[in-house]
Image (tube, helix red, strand yellow):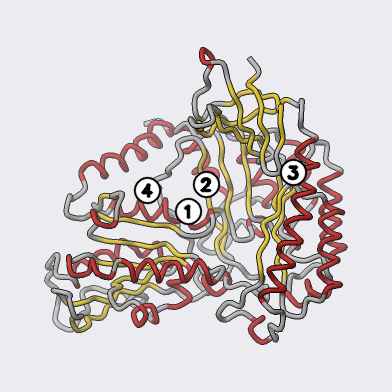
Amino acid sequence: MSDAHEHLTRASLILALYMSADAHKTFYLETFGCQMNVHDSEKVIGTLVHEGYRQVETVEQADLILYNTCSIRDKAEQKVFHRLADYKKLLAQGKKFGVLGCVAQQEGEKIFERAPHVSLVCGSASYRKLPRMLAQLEIASGEIEIPRPAGENAGLRDDASSKHMGSVKGASRTLVRITGLDDRETDECFETEFTARTNPHRGYITIIEGCDKFCAYCVVPFTRGKERSRTSESVLAEARQMADLGYTEIQLLGQNVNSYKDPAGKPGGGFSRNKKTFAELLAAVGEVPGIRRVRFTTSHPRDFGRDIIEAIDAVPALCDHVHLPVQSGSDRVLNAMQRLYTREQYMERIAWMKAARREISITSDIIVGFPGETEQDFAETLALLDEVGYDSVFTFKYSPRPNTPSLALEDAIPDEEKARRLEVLMARQREIQIARYRKYLGTISEVMVEGRNESRGQWIGRTSQNKTLNFTAPEPTAPKVGSYVQVRATASFPNSLVGEMVV
């Protein structure tokens, strides 16, 4: 059997499993948060389908209701608990509830106190245990009977636990507690061949999980564990499989994607003579036949090397876009944030990008109102916007998060002042984007067709620089979703371009 045929057979297996799934084992999954959570959910869905479950579109149709959660900001965390409270009434219908992801890892068994109807809590570092945990849930719920020797806890492993609780008012059955909460020292990544990707043209590959940076405001090191990378060989094998299945764009993911360290040659990592740096892996993925675009996110400035820019210049498939979060333009605030670089070091990396042969689009993240941020600190951040000229910036007000070092700092900046600074920052960046997007008027760009906006009569396209370029096309030459076409920009807005397909 050829490699291509084997890869296609694996993909077909998910569909076959889906069609043959037990009609009484249905699940609903809602995802909150970042692209890594979205991709984690794709892998969780594939795992569940492989275990005989069938995905449904509504909570009411599901036997098992799952929420893949985000705790980077308090608002996202509270949204999950509000959702759980809204659907508590469905417990009486025999439905089971599970909380996955960062909130699960952060709160652990406290979730059972806040939402007693939850039966399963699984942190993101424990997804590889899901098949075992699902079996435990079915056994403990009395859905299946498995004989076991006296004294054994239903074959449970040491790293997962199951508890039977008393009945809850209004519920007709005994509640069950299944937990999977790895500590941050795990060396294992969540790799599975049963990934249920939702987009048939663009797909994610996680190459590194966890974080070792411990920024003062960030919960990720506590919810995602330590940094651990996949071998470059396994990443490239997945990229080749995706190309064989017709994918043309791949996005490499990691909390700090450029902190990637190929474990090949280490104990458990397998032997390889082709151990790769991040830039080398990036280039290798870009050279996989059939792959036309490769993106990567999110990068950390400390680990951002000039070799990444050299790879972008050398390999046409690597998109000319870099997302490099700065968080603040003030050295004093950067030090308090424990960001591990200075403004000067950050601007050195910006200079590498601006000196590249290709025009690289630069985007970033910025936090305002960090404890102790003065008006002068904020002014330095505004000045940084002007100096860099970002194509887009994701902006946030500082909010304290559990377990983070910044909790020890006095958060004396009123929320009203944080909101004011955020508004000023966004207004300044809007002016910058208006000027930057206007530059593209009259230029021709290749776009990947992502869909169609029927109400506007426009096709939705995305450029290599990650800009949205909506366009019209003559009816006889209407493009297909997933195809690549040339578009001339005819109008600009602060966050997008409009154009006409070049026929």
Q: Tell me the CA gap for discs 3 and 4.
A: 34 Å
Q: Which mark is residue 204?
A: 2
- Which three-letter amino acid code belongs to the residue tagged 3? Ser
| 344 shown above or below 492 | below
The residue that mark 4 highlights is: 194
Residues marked 1 and 3 touching at CB (< 8 Å): no
Residue at x 61% of width, y 79% of height? 404
Mark 3 or mark 2, whichever is nearer to me: 3
* First of labels 3, 2 by sequence position: 2
| 17 shown above or below 120 | above
Left or right: 433, with 121 as reference point: right
* First of labels 1, 3 by sequence position: 1
Residue 392: give x, y in percent of width and height. Answer: 71, 49
Local crowd size for mark 3, using a 10 Å CA cut-off: few (<14), some (14–19), many (≥20): many
| Element marked by disc 3 | strand
Quarter-of-image position of residue 302:
bottom right
Local crowd size for mark 4, using a 10 Å CA cut-off: few (<14), some (14–19), many (≥20): some
Q: Tell me the CA gap for discs 2 and 4.
A: 14 Å
Mark 3 or mark 4, whichever is nearer to me: 3
Quarter-of-image position of residue 257:
bottom right
| Element marked by disc 1 | helix
- Which three-letter amino acid code belongs to the residue tagged 1? Val
Quarter-of-image position of residue 250:
top right
Left or right: 503, with 322 as reference point: left
* First of labels 4, 1 by sequence position: 1
The residue that mark 1 highlights is: 38
Left or right: 96, with 199 as reference point: left
